[in-house]
Image (cartoon, grey):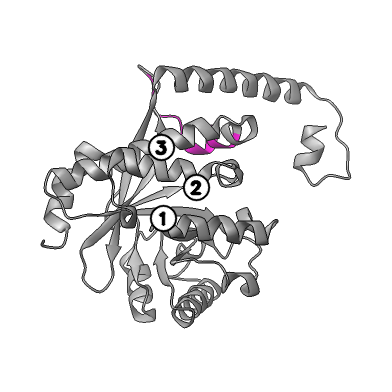
Amino acid sequence: MYQAKKEGRNTYRYHTEALSIAANERLIMENRLRHALAAGEFILHYQPLIDARAGHVIGVEALARWQPPDNTIVPPGKFIPIAEETGLIVPLGEWVLRTACEQGRAWIDTGLPPLVMAVNLSVRQFQSENLVELVQRILEETRLPAVCLELELTESMFMEHAERSIETLNRLKALGIQLAIDDFGTGYSSLTYLKRFPIDKLKIDQSFVRGLAHDPNDREIAATIIAMARGLKLGVLAEGIESEQQLDFLRQQGCDYYQGFLFHRPVPAIELEAWLREHSAPR
């Protein structure tokens, strides 16, 4: 039944041995996830966000990684979908938000200029009734300035219940934080609603950035998103930049912010701090 739903609904799938294996692997992964949350096996890696005009780092994106003891890191693509399905993404997401804010405050306390701390929200987190109160409480407890926190949401996350989503977004904005739409262009955008959402930034999905050097369609999409963002007075960030060719195109189009392996890979905070000191704006 779940396989049929996953593949488009209004269809059917026969039971196979492969489904039994997949279901067993999923159950094992769910149990491991529950143990990992209780045992504190999750860590955060941080990837810099670069100001295109000034050339210095203006923030970082916090990315969850699962590091079991005596084992290799589990890729997010393996555990995030299961965490979403089971609801474990809610306690995990709260841990990510709190830990990222604590790190942002710690960097300020060590003398770094205030940096944007970008944190992804899951669908379940966004739909939670106490989201705004949770964000406010974490900001107060960690003492991170609200202006330093940027929450990233996917466009499909708030299109289903747009009016209620606008209310939630307005309450979040009232805290003083920044809001960004992640993976822009991959969902079902409504320009009518987009102009009503209190959004500060659009992030061009890396699937479009990847083909900038050779695919005219990707170049056209990226240029259109940048022009639209400028018209709506929004910032625009391109993620997944890996080559000078991609960077040159984005620079020509007037992209505001950059992120990708070309500048720095996601790494633990302790590995990034010296680089941040070297590349941050002077205070």
The nearer-to-camera label among 1 and 3 is 1
* Badge 1 density bin: few <14, some 14–19, many ≥20, Cα 10 Å: some
Report the Cα–Cα distance between label 2 and label 3.
16 Å
Which residue has dot 3 on it? Answer: 96
**Residue 45 shows up from this direction:** no
- The residue located at (78%, 33%) in the rendering is 2
Residue 228 pos. (x, y %): 51, 79
- The residue located at (32%, 49%) in the rendering is 47
The nearer-to-camera label among 2 and 3 is 2
| Contact (Cβ within 8 Å) of mark 1 with mark 3 | no
| Contact (Cβ within 8 Å) of mark 2 with mark 1 | yes
* Badge 2 density bin: few <14, some 14–19, many ≥20, Cα 10 Å: some
Q: Amino acid at mark 1?
A: Leu
Which residue has dot 1 on it? Answer: 175
- SS of the residue under disc 1: loop
- The residue located at (45%, 36%) in the rendering is 94
- The residue located at (68%, 25%) in the rendering is 22
Q: Amino acid at mark 3?
A: Val
For marks 2 and 3, the one nearer the N-term is 3
Residue 196: image quadrant is bottom right
For marks 2 and 1, the one nearer the N-term is 2
Looking at the rendering, the stretch of residues picked out in magenta corresponds to 71-81
Quadrant containing the N terminus is top right
Residue 142 pos. (x, y %): 30, 39
Q: Nearer the viewer, residue 275 or 211?
A: 275
Report the Cα–Cα distance between label 2 and label 1.
8 Å
In the rendered image, the vertical position of residue 64 relative to residue 52, given as above or below: above
Which residue has dot 2 on it? Answer: 132
Q: Amino acid at mark 2?
A: Val
209 lies left or right of 272? right
* Badge 3 density bin: few <14, some 14–19, many ≥20, Cα 10 Å: many
Residue 139 pos. (x, y %): 35, 44
